[in-house]
């Protein structure tokens, strides 16, 4: 009986670890823990300070931050890629444990249930485990 309870608790814990994706959100003013779920989505929006055009990057929370997509104008895309490759295709293949952004004009981060707007600063969201 004890063994069955132990195995049940282990399976339950493994299921929670597989679904819950805790992260640390760090900004210039401090840090906090976020509780995210595998399968949730996120986005980062900002204005490119050189071209003055908006950039929107979307992604999904899986084992890592993955399935990235980007929406911006052709001039801003050429600024990032020097016109050598399609940015959307390159981003779609990326997967990262952390996201780091800095902006002098502001950043809007939506990560699962959380929404952060930061003016003139940097932020980093880092997953605590990548199971």
Image (cartoon, helix red, strand yellow):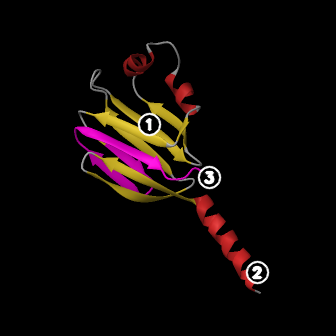
Q: Could you say where residue 9 lies in the image, as x and y percent from the top left? A: 66, 75
Give the residue pinned by disc 2: 4
Q: Quadrant of the N terminus?
A: bottom right
Q: Element at badge 2?
A: helix
Q: Residue at x 73, y 85 (%)?
A: 2
Q: Could you say where residue 16 lies in the image, as x and y percent from the top left? A: 60, 65
Foreground: 37 or 78? 37
Q: Element at badge 1?
A: strand
Quarter of the view holding residue 75: top left
Foreground: 117 or 56? 117
Q: Element at badge 3?
A: loop
Q: Is residue 20 left or right of residue 101?
A: right
Q: Could you say where residue 44 lies in the image, as x and y percent from the top left? A: 39, 40
Q: How many marks?
A: 3
Asked if labels 1 and 2 touch by Cβ distance under 8 angstroms, the answer is no
Q: Residue at x 44, y 36 (%)?
A: 57
Q: Is residue 13 left or right of residue 32?
A: right
Which of the two marks, 2 or 1, is nearer to us in this view?
2
| Distance between mark 1 and mark 3 Cα atoms | 24 Å
Q: Earlier in the sequence, mark 1 or mark 3?
A: 1
The residue stretch that appears in magenta:
108-131
Q: Residue at x 23, y 34 (%)?
A: 105
Q: Earlier in the sequence, mark 3 or mark 2?
A: 2
Q: Residue at x 36, y 46 (%)?
A: 109
Which of the two marks, 1 or 3, is nearer to us in this view?
3
Give the residue pinned by disc 1: 57
| Distance between mark 3 and mark 2 Cα atoms | 25 Å
Give the residue pinned by disc 3: 131
Classify 10 Å Cα crowding around label 3: few (below 14), some (14-19), many (20 and above).
few
Q: Is residue 14 left or right of residue 65?
A: right
């Amino acid at each position: 009986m004890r063994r069955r309870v132990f195995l049940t608790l282990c399976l339950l814990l493994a299921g929670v670890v597989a679904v819950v994706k805790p992260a640390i959100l760090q900004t210039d003013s401090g840090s906090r823990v976020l509780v995210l779920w595998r399968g949730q989505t996120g986005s980062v929006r900002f204005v490119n300070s050189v071209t003055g055009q908006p950039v929107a990057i979307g992604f999904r929370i899986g084992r890592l931050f993955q399935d990235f997509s980007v929406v911006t104008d052709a001039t801003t895309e050429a600024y990032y890629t020097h016109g050598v490759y399609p940015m959307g295709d390159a981003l779609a293949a990326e997967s990262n444990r952390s996201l780091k952004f800095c902006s002098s004009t502001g950043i809007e981060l939506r990560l699962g249930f959380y929404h952060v707007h930061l003016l003139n600063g940097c932020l980093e969201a880092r997953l605590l485990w990548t199971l």
